[in-house]
Amino acid sequence: MTQRSITPHRLCYSVVANLTLLGLVVSTFFCLVGSTYAASPSPNGQARLQPLIKFTSDTPISDDSGSGTRHFSCQSPNAKAICYGPSQIRKAYNIQPLLDDGVTGKGATIVIVDAFQAPDIQNDLKSFDQAFGLNDTDLNIIAPDGLTPFDPQDANQVDWSAEISLDVEWAHAVAPNATIDLVLSKSDEERDLVSAINHAIDEDLGDVISMSFGINETCMAGQQLWHQAFRDATSKGTTLLASSGDTGAAEDSCDGTKPIKEVLYPAVDPFVTAVGGTQLHADLSTGEYHDEVAWNEPKYHAATGGGFSTSVPKPFYQNSVNGIGNYRGIPDVSYDAAIGDGGVIVRWSEAPNGAGFYIVGGTSSGSPQWAGIVALAVQDGKSRIGLLNTTIYSSDQKPHYSSNFYDVTSGNNSITLPDANNKQVTIEGYSAGPGWNLTTGWGSPQAAALVPYLANHNAINLSSSDLASL
């Protein structure tokens, strides 16, 4: 059987340079990776998984505060591209009340699985903490199969270094006292990433695993190996999270020639909670929540991944959801993924244009932050949470839904993308609506209510029949 590898999605940016003397923000757009479709096999035939990350700047964004906790030019109402820091996200998603009460993730461990490396991640995390007044935490870097030397001329490795920076910094922003185990695969090939995941599971490294990468589910050669790894993790009570994708209802075909209507693996695996994307509208200073819509930014050729699997049967926990046929639907939940209209700030030293703070978007942003929320629940309940989907799809959650989640009811994930001949192809997607849907799942978290709910309704002891059914 031919193996394929899992590679990153396009890494796109728009220049957001603060011109202090003129008081202007100038924005233009370009992509690091020239092709939209980056899922072609590596030279040895392995499929390469894709980090689900997008940028809005190829030059560092500027700090315009002068002193204290930093404020950036993109946090001004007249900015062409706007962004959020930790305090705004914590306020918008009702995380701050938990932190104020001492629920900070202390005693919990978040495992982040990525490929290659970001040589300056330890220093970048410290710079991120200093910029936003966050405490330091334990960051352990684990490379079970060895580290590949970082090549700054390799755009693929550069993409992954950005992914690592986003994942680590924003998991920490949500759960500031959780330990983070960064488990690095020696490449983004399918077999190497599943080896890293198996190491994390076999060694029982953490309470929750975040995976901000994926590939068209039909292109996976070793899907059963991944599925068995996820079954093993779930049997240990470990929660699994993965980003749902950044190209709407489309994914690249396995030969890389055109966009087709498909969903991503590992997000679609039934043991995994798939995290879709929203566009969050919140006060740029206070973070006061205004509203959210399904993430869809045509100028960046980006939208939240979501749709039905063509191979994974509908899991038992989705039986009660109207409109689902015989196959699994994703996403399960969502989180801010916007790029130019609400990205998050990331410190990134391996950037082609130099170390600094950048605006980042994509569903990659949501998976590590949801992992932080799970870590808060682990501390609060003094126990692992297990298969998150069992809890959030449960009938027990219905009376609590409006306080646990923001119900994101507008927008869609239709998208137009070029094929290999640069012909524009439109893939009709799905529309958001009340309750669960194929763009934003159940919606985004209201953590102050959701975390104690998860702590008191965990699913760490799934029956053997439930495990066997997935």
Image (spheres, rainbow, N blue to C red):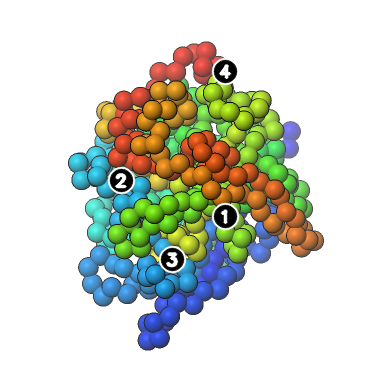
Front-lying residue, 400 or 109: 400
Mark 1 touches mark 4? (CB < 8 Å)? no
Residue 96, percent from left and from top: 27, 48
Name the mark nearer the viewer: 1 or 4: 1
Residue assigned mark 4? 469
Mark 2 residue crowding within 10 angstroms, few (<14) / some (14–19) / many (20+): many
Residue assigned mark 1? 296
Compare marks 3 and 1 and give the one earlier in the sequence. 3
Q: Residue at x 25, y 42 (%)?
A: 98
Q: Which SS class for mark 3? A: strand
Mark 2 touches mark 3? (CB < 8 Å)? no
Residue assigned mark 2? 95
Q: Residue at x 45, y 41 (%)?
A: 407
Compare marks 2 and 4 and give the one earlier in the sequence. 2
Q: What numbered label is drawn on residue 82?
A: 3
Q: What kind of residue is marked 4?
A: Ser
- Give the CA distance from mark 2 to mark 4: 34 Å
Name the mark nearer the viewer: 2 or 4: 2
Mark 1 residue crowding within 10 angstroms, few (<14) / some (14–19) / many (20+): many
Front-lying residue, 175 or 150: 175
Extreme-bottom residue of the structure: 21
Compare marks 2 and 3 and give the one earlier in the sequence. 3
Mark 4 residue crowding within 10 angstroms, few (<14) / some (14–19) / many (20+): few
Q: Which SS class for mark 2? A: loop
Extreme-left residue of the structure: 101
- Give the CA distance from mark 3 to mark 4: 44 Å
Residue 256, percent from left and from top: 74, 51
Front-lying residue, 259 or 31: 259
Q: What kind of residue is marked 3?
A: Ile
Q: Quadrant of the C terminus?
A: top right
Q: Is residue 189 visible?
A: no
Picture quadrant of residue 126? bottom left
